[in-house]
Image (cartoon, grey):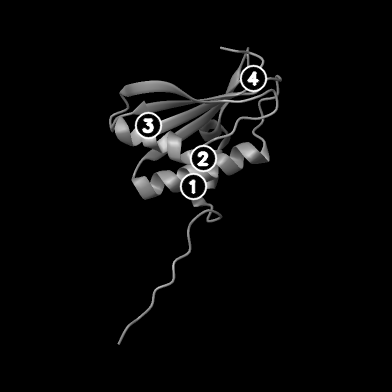
Amino acid sequence: MDRENGHLWIIGMNEVGYILYIELMALGTVRSVAVDLMNVFRVAVMKNATRVITVHNHLSDRLLPSEVDKDITDRLIQVGRILNIQLIDHLIITIENYVAFKGLGLMEELEKNLKYVPTYQCYRTN
């Protein structure tokens, strides 16, 4: 792994948790990684994954998720719901350690969040 730039990896699994693929989805810079949500789920759909885990690295030893990390995870959860592909967890890794959103209680918190849930208007016709 290039330790001087950010990476985003996706682990795609089937319904029982068997790993179907591990794929690098984005290679960033020393400051950030641009995440294309369509690409993340395009690969999952093409490879018949029903569950995914995202993994990205922090170049510093800081393991706490940033607000941007939480925001991207929230958006991935919502897009996954539309496609019926569950985001199981999001891991942040450094050279020596890692942290899981699920272990921090963030997955449950973000799954309840309605920030990126599309609002729909229903029109009644008579």
Question: Marks 2 and 4, Cα distance to the nearest angstrom?
Answer: 25 Å
Mark 4 or 3 closer to N-term?
Answer: 4
Mark closer to the observer (2, 4): 4
Mark 2 or 4 closer to N-term?
Answer: 4
Q: Nearer the viewer, residue 49 or 91?
A: 49
Mark closer to the observer (4, 1): 4
* Mark 3: secondary structure: helix
Mark closer to the observer (1, 3): 3
Mark 1 or 3 closer to N-term?
Answer: 3
Residue 108 visible to the viewer: no
Q: Could you tell me which residue is drawn at 46 percent across and 48 percent down? A: 78
Mark 3 or 2 closer to N-term?
Answer: 3
Question: Marks 4 and 3, Cα distance to the nearest angstrom?
Answer: 22 Å
Task: State left or right for residue 90 relative to residue 97.
Answer: left
Residue beneath label 2, please? 107
The numbered disc on residue 5 is: 4
Q: Could you tell me which residue is drawn at 44 percent across and 34 percent down? A: 40
Q: Are marks 2 and 4 in contact (CB under 8 Å)?
A: no
The numbered disc on residue 43 is: 3
Q: Are marks 3 and 2 in contact (CB under 8 Å)?
A: no
* Mark 2: secondary structure: helix
* Mark 1: secondary structure: helix
Residue beneath label 1, please? 111
* Mark 4: secondary structure: loop
Q: Could you tell me which residue is drawn at 64 percent across and 33 percent down? A: 65
Percent x, y for residue 114?
52, 56
Is 72 above or below relative to 112? above
Amino acid on which the number 1 mark rests in the picture: Glu
